[in-house]
Image (spheres, coloured by chain):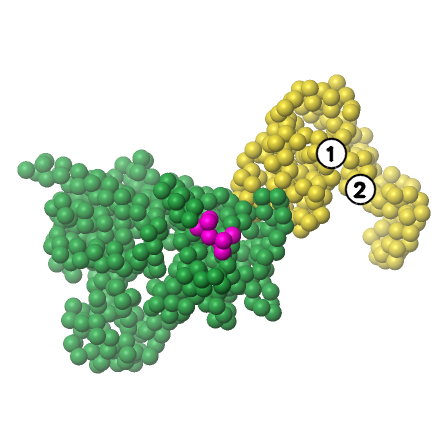
Amino acid sequence: MTDVVATNETILVVGGGISGMTAALEAAECGKDVVLLEKSPSLGGRVSQLYKYFPKLCHPTCGMEINLKRIKANKRIRVLTLAEVSAITGKPGDYTATIRISPRYVNEHCTACGACAEAVAAEFDNEFNYGMGKRKGAYLSSAMAYPQRYVIDPRILGTPDAEKAKSACKYNAVDLGMKEETVNLKVGAVVWATGWKPYDANKIQPYGYDRYKNVITSVEFERLMDPFGPTGGKLVRPSDGKEAKNVAFIQCAGSRDRNHLKHCSRICCMASLKQSTYVREKYADDANVSIYYIDIRAIDRFEDFYKRIQADPKVKFIKSKVANITEDKATGNPILHGVDTEGYHRYDNPHDLVVLAIGMEPSVDASRIMPGVKADASGFIDINATTEAVFGAGCASNALDVNRSVQNATAAALRAIQVVNRVSRAEA
Amino acid sequence: MTDLNKVMVEKYRNDFLKEVEANVEEGNWVKMCMQCGVCSGSCPLGPHWEHPPQEIFMMIRAGKRDEVLRSESMWMCTSCYNCIVRCPRELPITHIMHGLANYAHRLGIAPKLNPTRRFAKMFWNNITAGGRVNELKLSVGLYFMDGFASGIKKGLEMLPVGLGMLKTGRLNPFGLFSGGHCKGAGDIRKMIKKAKEIEDKRKGFAA
């Protein structure tokens, strides 16, 4: 992996989610050399963890497959997984990026046969399913993983499991002697696409995410629908496996709240509207969905989608920010308490399952990238105040949905291309 | 209608929000409410309010001056601060409720028989008289607030507690007769009088 050749005409893309993949592809397909970094073992990011996209409700696997095919076909993109930037120094057109590459303990001989996973006994929380369910100590993060190469969890190193994995491999692909590497790359411009993470729901004390099993987040709900997910695609609640037919969505869980995230996370209204269709898909007329909201922000053409859900008699809209949640000990049902704004009626509504439409915060606080990169009040990259050729793409630059992330990433790629074009003209 | 109330009605005519902003403590925050309702849902006494805080804010903006100022609602606030802690826009709701109650009282249109208002008056007179609270006078005053008979009844109910406090030295029976004033109580009264003058002048309450 240390054989990466990079010059100051190379564009470094940090983050291998939908934004990073898009920026890398757009730049590479314009003829620029790109190094694409991903800190986890596989490309795909949070989009690969979705069941369906809004508004067309198609499956993201399809879009991901197209992008992966483009990446495989393009010789100008070098993909480094398990790689993180530890520092960037220099100036626009002439940066040195220090990159730390963690060992995978599996080399390129891997055929993803899965024999190592079968041999290993140790299990860990499955990150791909937001900690719901377990995965083996030797694993492929998902069926769509790219590269299709297993990973040995460093926690099994030095245990008999590690040796079992090694001897189970017929292709001599398990290499327990791999070491962490640090490489310095010369690059001309950086596209920063480190994406977002869900706001820590434990901090929203009145909603009891830390206390009640049947209060989950929207990202977890998404995983329940996946046929390969923790419940095998069954929409059941965590406490007792009961079918979750009466589901409540709480909007602005962490967003638009000066005690939590100041900004509107933009995706959550559409995500809950979309997820209401999941409940209908599973339980048809037995489904009952309640959406508790301050105001529904279905921007521009999404209004049609909102109108369609509004017309569904099985989906109720309650204009109210829920004050707090308690639990009915006998049934395990969370009970939502509050006052609605349309008439000021006090309610205490029990539901099978409560989904917090959790807010979005940047994975990396932009102020920590390098001195010339400025953060806005929420930690996203403030493009207007940034003086370096480090261009935010997707959710590193703002709270965006997939569609807008892709547009934003294309714009970031164009900005990076202009910088390396200036370098090549100066050197010609 | 008192004179001050007439003056204020004339001055602000159709703009109750402006009146609240100018005269009610922290009233300038009212316009920041986004009607999410978390305050009303979080209030432990919420079910007993005729108009919960969220509704009061909307009524202020809708110009429902009399309904708000003559309401018993904001007098229900017990200063538990749950609403302030949870408000996503950090409105000082507790303070606004007290501010509204105080303003209505100053205008002389607060509900005359509201027990919170009566107790607040009693407390204020008690503490400003001597610069510190005379607890015995205050509690006896509270028991007899609704008349002699009910005062005797409440007093007898509390007798075991009072005797217990007497025994442990937590209650001075002579407090009922002695002032129990702090040193320089007269100076404190002068300061409060001056502060009231300044406030009245600033808010245009001075006749």
> Considering the image in quadrants, where does the N terminus of chain A appear?
bottom left
A335 in relation to A134, above or below: above
Characterize the local packing of mark 2: few (<14), some (14-19) or many (20 or more) Cα atoms within 10 angstroms. some
What's the residue type where badge 1 is placed?
A: Arg
B121 in relation to A126, above or below: above
Left or right: residue A120 compared with residue A236: left
Q: Position of residue A325 (x, y in %)?
A: 57, 57
| Extent of the magenta region | A309-316
Chain depicted in yellow:
B
Give the mark nearest the N terminus, 2 or 1.
Answer: 1
> Considering the image in quadrants, where does the C terminus of chain A appear?
top left
Q: Residue at x 39, y 45 (%)?
A: A304
Q: Is residue A339 visible?
A: yes
- Residue A82 highlighted magenta (yes or no): no
**A37 or A208: which is nearer to us?**
A208
Q: Residue at x 49, y 43 (%)?
A: A295
Q: Position of residue A401 (x, y in %)?
A: 34, 48
Left or right: residue B3 compared with residue A129: right
**B146 or A296: which is nearer to us?**
A296
User: Marks 2/1: CA distance?
Assistant: 14 Å
Q: Chain of mark 1?
A: B
Q: Secondary structure at mark 1?
A: loop
Q: Residue B115 — which label?
A: 2
Q: Position of residue A140 (x, y in %)?
A: 27, 69
